[in-house]
Image (cartoon, rainbow, N blue to C red):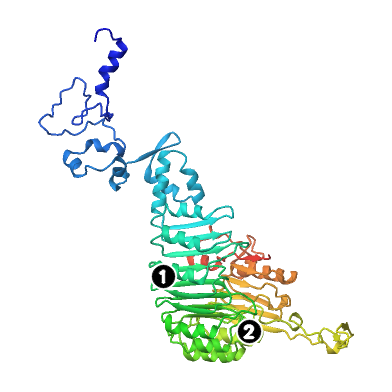
Amino acid sequence: MVGESPAVATASSAAPKRGALKKRGSYNCGRCGLPKKGHICPSGNGDILPPRSDHRLRRALSFEEDRTPSAVAAAPGMEEEEVAETPAAADYEEVEVGGGVLPVSCLVEVLRRLSPKELMGAAVVCRGWRECVKRVWRSAEELRLRVSPRSQIGFVGSVLHKCAGLARLTLRIESDVDATLLACVAFSCPSLEAFEINIGDNAVNRITGDELGRFVAEKRCLSVLKVEGCTSLGLLNLHSSSLSTLWLSDLYCISKMVISCPNLKELSLDFTRQENDSTDLVTMMDSLGRTCPRLRNMHIASIQLCNDAVLALASTNLRGLRMLSLVLGSKITDAAVAAIVSNYSSLELIDLSGSSISDSGIGMICNAFSQTLSRLLLALCPNITSSGIQFATAQLPLLQLIDCGMSMRAINSQNESPEENGLIGNEGSGELRRCQKSPTSKPQPIYQKLIIKHGCLRRISLWGCSDLDALYLNCPELNDLNLNSCANLHPERLLLQCPKLEHVHASGCQDMLTGAIRNQVLNEFAVVQNHLPCKRLADGSKRVQVPRYPLQQPSDDGKHRRLRRTQCTVHLD
C-alpha cells in the first residue's frame, strides 16, 4: 500500500503466514543420503538404495524419519517418546557421560546398584539420566527403604509410586507408624508379594489387628509378611489363601487369634517378656491345626508356654511339621516332650531353649528322631547334664548343630536363696542381717566333662557352661565352636581334634585357656611335623627334617591335600 511504512507492510504480509510451526526435516535425502539442495534423486522410481559406507548410525529417537509410509499409517498416534520406549529402539539409545556417550542399557545397569537416595540424586543430573532413573524405578522388583524420623508418609508414597512392578518391599521405620502406611503400600504396590516392616528403637507401631487383617485380605498376591513391634494389635484375624510366611514379633495381650491361611508353611510368633500377658496360647495352638494344615516351620516364643499348650499343639493334624521351636517356656517338662514324639515323626529341628526338660526328655527325642533330626537347641535348660548331651551326639548321626549354652552351670553362678547367701531375716523388723557360715555349709560345685565324637557336627555352642571342666572334641567337620564364658574349663583338659575348625569364640575365658586354644588350633607345624621327611646331611653324620616347601617338593596331590589346613580365627570379644 501507498503511504504505509516498510515495517508495517512487512508485518501485514507476514501475518497470513503465521500458524503452527512445522518441524524442520533433514537436510539430506531420505533415499540416497545426499544433500537435498540442487539434488535430483536417482532413486525416483521408488527403489531405496542402501546407505553409503560412511553413513553414521544415529540415535534411536531420530529413526522415525526412516519409517516407511505403511509403518507411519499403522501407528499414526505414536509419539516420539513412545517409540523410544520400545525394546528395539531402546537398544540404540545413548546418553552423555563425562563428555562421551554411553548406551542407556549400560547406564541403567550401573544405576540399579545405587540406593534410593543416590538414585534421586542421579535423576537431577540431566534429562537423559532422569529417563534412565525412571526406567530403573519402573523395572525394580525389590526395594529396601529406610524412613528417618524427619521423613513423612508422603515420602514413602512418592517413592513407591515410581515402582509399579515392585514385588518385595522392606521398610525400616524410625518413627511412629499407623495404618496410613498400610494404605499407602496397598495403593502403590498392587502386585506386592513380600512385605517387611522393621521398627526402630524409639518408634512405636500403632497398627491394630483389624487394619492388618484388611491389608492382608486386600493383597491377593501377598505371600510373605513380617512385622515388628506388634504391641497394639489387640486381636489377630488373618484370612489369606496366598500367605505362606508370617512373622509377628512383640505380641502382647492378644484377646482373639484366628490365622486362617490354608497355604501357610512358616509361622513365627514372638511375644513380649511380660508376666501379665493374657494371651490364651492353648486355644491358639488348638486352632492352628484346623486353619493351617500345611504348616512346616513353627516358632513360638513366650514365657506363658506350658505343657497344656504343647499338648494342644500335639493333638492337631500337623503331620507335615519339620521344624518346631518352643522357646522360653519354663513350664515345659518331659511330659510335653512325650506328646511331641508321639505325634510327630519327621522333625528336623527342635528348639526347647528355656524349658525344664531333663536328660530323660533328650533320650525320648533321640529315640524318636534318630534318622531325621539335624539341629537340636537346648540352651537355658538347667536340668540337663553332660551325660544327656553326650547321649544325643551318639544317637543322632545326622546332627549338624547343637546348642546347650547356659545349661551346664555351676551352683555358685545360679540364683541363690537368702539362706544360701548367709542372710537371715528378722520377722519383726523385716530386715536382713548377714551371719557367718561355717566352711562346711557352702555347697561345692560339681564339675562335668563332655566328650563328643561325631562325623557330621558343624557347630557346637557351649556358651555360659560354667560347670564344664573338661572338653574333648573329635569332629572332623566342625567349623564353629562357641566357648564364651566357660570360666571353669581347665586348659589341660581341653582337646580339639577338628581339622576344619574356622571360628572359636572364647570371650570371658581364662587367659591360660585362651592360650591352650590358640596352641591347638593355630599351631600348624605341630600337627604336620610328623609327616615331614628326614634326610641325612652331606657328611652322613645325622638325620634332619626337611623343611616344607609345598610348591617345590615333587609329591602327589593327595599329600599336599593332607598338609593343607584350614585357617582358624579365635574371637575374644
Task: Looking at this view, name the residue that lies furthest to the right.
Answer: 436
> Whole-percent x and y of residue 68?
18, 38
Can see residue 562?
yes
Which residue is at the front of the view, 54 or 35? 35
449 over 188 or under it: above or below: below
Quadrant in the picture for the C terminus: bottom right
Which residue is painted at 48% across and 69% down in the image? Answer: 212
Tag 1: amino acid: Ala
Question: In the figure, is residue 44 to the left or right of 117?
Answer: left
Q: CA distance from mark 1 to mark 2?
A: 36 Å
Residue under numbered circle 2: 330
> Whole-percent x and y of residue 540?
64, 64
- The image quarter containing residue 38 is top left
Which residue is at the front of the view, 394 or 74? 74
Can see residue 374?
no
Residue under numbered circle 1: 217
> Whole-percent x and y of residue 461?
61, 75
9 over 116 or under it: above or below: above
> Whole-percent x and y of residue 283?
51, 85
- Numbered disc in front, either 1 or 2: 1
Task: Looking at this view, name the residue that lies furthest to the top.
Answer: 3
SS at badge 1: helix
